[in-house]
């Protein structure tokens, strides 16, 4: 159950996070204007991808809000891929220079651990 004292956008973020964990989404009473705060709240809390994954479960989300979330999620993925690519090149350069280095977080660290 989502607390009643959460702002509507925060309640939507909690619902998105629960959905990403394969939990059932709690139907939320959402007013039209409450949807408008969702993209900014998702971005501020690093949950844009979770919200995007929840979009099919919210048929009443306004199209402009849906489009903003989808666009921001694409941009987030592009930035993440660019960052991984840059980090990979940096690690290769350091290795070539004889410097052992490890990325402490992210997909490159996971690959190294594996």
Image: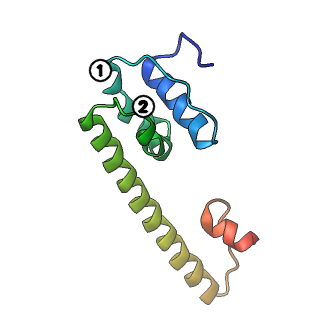
Q: Depth check: 97 or 78 in front?
A: 78
Identify the image quadrant of residue 103.
bottom right
Looking at the image, can residue 102 be seen?
no
Q: Residue at x 52, y 16 (%)?
A: 6
Indicate the quadrant where residue 88 lies: bottom right
Name the image quarter holding the N terminus. Answer: top right
Residue 33: x and y, percent? 29, 19
Q: Which mark is residue 41?
A: 2
Residue 41 location in percent, x, y? Answer: 42, 31
Residue 32 percent location from the top left of the image: 29, 20
Could you tell which of marks 2 and 1 lies nearer the N-terminus? 1
Q: Residues within 10 Å of mark 1 (few under 14, many from 20)?
A: few
Can you say whether 105 is above or below 20 in the image? Answer: below
Q: Give the residue at mark 1.
A: 32
Quarter of the C terminus within the rendering: bottom right
Q: Which mark is residue 56?
A: none
Q: Nearer the viewer, residue 21 or 27?
A: 27
Please say if 79 is above or below 51.
below
Query: What is the residue that sits farthest to the right in this orientation?
Result: 113
């Amino acid at each position: 159950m989502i607390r009643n004292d959460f702002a509507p956008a925060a309640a939507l973020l909690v619902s998105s996070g629960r959905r990403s964990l394969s939990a059932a989404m709690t139907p939320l009473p959402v007013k039209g204007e409450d949807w408008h705060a969702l993209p900014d709240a998702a971005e501020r809390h690093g949950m844009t991808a979770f919200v995007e994954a929840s979009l099919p479960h919210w048929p009443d989300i306004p199209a402009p809000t849906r489009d903003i979330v989808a666009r921001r999620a694409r941009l987030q993925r592009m930035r993440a891929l660019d960052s991984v690519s840059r980090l990979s090149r940096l690690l290769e350069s350091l290795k070539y220079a004889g410097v052992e280095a490890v990325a402490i977080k992210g997909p490159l660290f996971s690959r190294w651990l594996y």
